[in-house]
Image: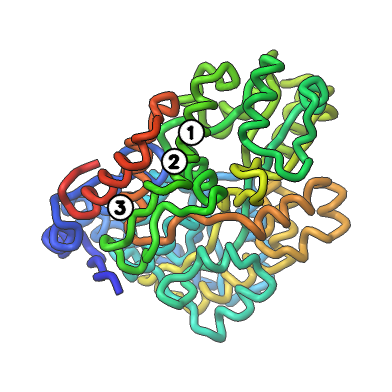
């Protein structure tokens, strides 16, 4: 069992040094340099101010749900669950930043300050182990966990656990597909849905047709998603024995890591790469498939709804949507099925909430099958229960739903470790920019990750 971190920076300044073996380090969960707890002064101010937030008046107890940005889908579910509660509680939403690292930092500041007004939070799966290990989340009991995990993708449940306990409830899951222009695939003479379709075939097809492959190559968590998926698809993993914390085994320097590096170098140094690859995030990469050289795109399930919306708004030619096809994430080895990326959002209950039992009740409502379906239809974000993908309304709106379901079922989550930010930051540091990747990159990233975890290097 890894050593627990303290829950207030005033107590953890020294403990963090002992736990990590160095002074305070910054590790990205998405964009470069954010961290969980920051200065003791800032947290002291938060402790004095944020914990003073009450229910905001009489009536039903208020539950504050910190949500990631969307188009209003979570707020609509909060209103619906408030009505369904019949006066037992009311849910109000508070919007987090759009950047996942900033979301993480804002939440952890409040949790480290023991903010009793943080009742519910929408969490990226990679944050669960870190927050759970710090005792910032209220674990669900076995009886509470049963309805939250029954009929849920195993990958989503796995990402919600820490040390055998459920610390977050899967709300929506996610995976990446290979989106492609049918006309380009036809010109290239390829079928992306054919068994054994690989990254090599994809890159070669794009080069032949002078088209691009949109991927997330910026130095942020989206690039880590790509690296992890390539390594997992090659039969490897970045770390093992994550429960050992900073003593976890670093396994990125492996045949699978070497193969991932070969693919990234081949792609990044070819004309199939976007000229802005090293700074492309999800939206920048999505824009490439709509451009003059648009051909292929690796991106999340939101792409379908986004492309249709842009076409309806006149931002892109409507013919592009009709030309858009989809296929499973490309394989690394033609004899081995790919392990697509896994993502999504899970609902955690704050350990310092004054209304933890009510928050558990609200979590059941938020993550109910009906609300998962509603959120998928409203926002285009993919449900965490496979049965929903067979719903006629879902199939009508998302013709690729069966592929999404199968991809999530075989997806490869990123490492579940309380040191995830350090692992991700170390990998990104040595694998970026993509065009710099070579045969030494896996070894150098393994050495750097070990040094960071051992307190011998800083991010």
Quadrant of image for the N terminus = bottom left
Whole-number angstrom distance, CA of label 3 to CA of label 1: 33 Å
Quadrant for residue 12, please give it.
Answer: bottom left
Q: How many numbered marks appear?
A: 3
**Do the numbered discs 2 and 1 sit on residues whose CB atoms are within 8 Å?**
yes
Mark positioned earlier in the residue sequence (3 or 1): 3
Task: Bin the neighbour count of mark 3 within 10 Å (Cα to Cα): few under 14, some 14-19, many 20 and up.
Answer: many
Q: Does 289 sit above or below residue 348?
A: above
User: Residue 392 placed where, x, y %?
Assistant: 88, 57
Question: Horizontal placement of 15 versus 309: left or right?
Answer: left
User: Residue 404 placed where, x, y %?
Assistant: 72, 51
SS for callout 2? helix
SS for callout 3? loop
Task: Bin the neighbour count of mark 2 within 10 Å (Cα to Cα): few under 14, some 14-19, many 20 and up.
Answer: some
SS for callout 1? helix
Q: Does 32 sit above or below residue 132?
A: above
Look at mark 2 in the image and give the residue it sits on. 258
Mark positioned earlier in the residue sequence (3 or 2): 3
Residue at image position (26%, 53%) is 37
Question: Horizontal placement of 193 versus 63: left or right?
Answer: right
Whole-number angstrom distance, CA of label 2 to CA of label 1: 6 Å
Look at mark 1 in the image and give the residue it sits on. 262
Residue 226 or 150: which is nearer the viewer? 226
Quadrant for residue 408, please give it.
Answer: bottom right
Residue 99 in view: no
User: Residue 143 placed where, x, y %?
Assistant: 56, 86
Look at mark 3 in the image and give the residue it sits on. 36
């Amino acid at each position: 069992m890894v050593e627990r971190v303290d829950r207030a920076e005033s107590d953890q300044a020294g403990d963090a040094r002992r736990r990590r073996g160095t002074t305070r380090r910054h590790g990205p969960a998405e964009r470069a340099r954010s961290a969980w707890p920051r200065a003791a002064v800032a947290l002291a101010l938060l402790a004095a101010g944020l914990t003073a937030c009450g229910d905001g008046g009489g009536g039903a107890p208020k539950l504050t749900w910190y949500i990631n940005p969307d188009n209003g889908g979570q707020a609509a579910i909060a209103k619906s669950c408030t009505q369904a509660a019949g006066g037992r509680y009311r849910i109000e939403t508070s919007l987090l930043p759009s950047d996942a690292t900033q979301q993480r930092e804002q939440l952890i500041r409040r949790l480290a300050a023991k903010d009793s007004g943080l009742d519910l939070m929408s969490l990226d799966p990679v944050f669960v182990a870190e927050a759970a290990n710090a005792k910032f989340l209220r674990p669900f009991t076995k009886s509470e966990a049963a309805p939250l995990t029954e009929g849920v993708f195993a990958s989503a449940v796995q990402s919600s656990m820490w040390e055998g306990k459920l610390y977050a409830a899967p709300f929506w899951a996610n995976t990446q597909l290979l989106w492609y222009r049918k006309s380009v695939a036809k010109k290239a003479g390829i079928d992306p849905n054919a068994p054994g379709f690989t990254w090599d075939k994809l890159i070669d097809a794009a080069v032949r047709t002078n088209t691009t492959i949109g991927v997330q190559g910026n130095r942020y968590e989206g690039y880590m998603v790509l690296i992890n998926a390539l390594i997992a698809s090659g039969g490897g993993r970045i770390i093992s024995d994550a429960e050992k914390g900073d003593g976890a085994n670093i396994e990125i320097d492996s045949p699978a890591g070497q193969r991932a590096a070969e693919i990234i170098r081949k792609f990044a140094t070819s004309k199939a790469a976007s000229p802005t690859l090293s700074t492309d995030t999800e939206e920048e990469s999505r824009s490439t498939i709509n451009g003059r050289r648009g051909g292929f795109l690796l991106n999340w399930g939101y792409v379908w709804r986004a492309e249709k919306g842009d076409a309806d708004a006149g931002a892109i030619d409507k013919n592009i949507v009709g030309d858009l096809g989809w296929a499973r994430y490309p394989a690394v080895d033609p004899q081995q099925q790919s392990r697509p990326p896994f993502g999504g959002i899970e609902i955690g209950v704050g350990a310092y909430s004054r209304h933890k039992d009510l928050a558990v009740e609200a979590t059941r409502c938020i993550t109910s099958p009906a609300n998962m379906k509603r959120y998928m239809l409203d926002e285009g974000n993919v449900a965490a229960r496979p049965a929903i993908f067979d719903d006629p309304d879902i199939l009508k709106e998302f013709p690729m739903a069966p592929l999404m379901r199968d991809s999530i079922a075989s997806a490869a989550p990123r490492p579940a470790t309380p040191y995830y930010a350090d692992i991700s930051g170390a990998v990104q540091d040595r694998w970026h920019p993509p065009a710099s990747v070579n045969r030494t990159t896996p070894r150098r990233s393994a050495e750097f990750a070990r040094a960071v975890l051992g307190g011998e290097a800083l991010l």
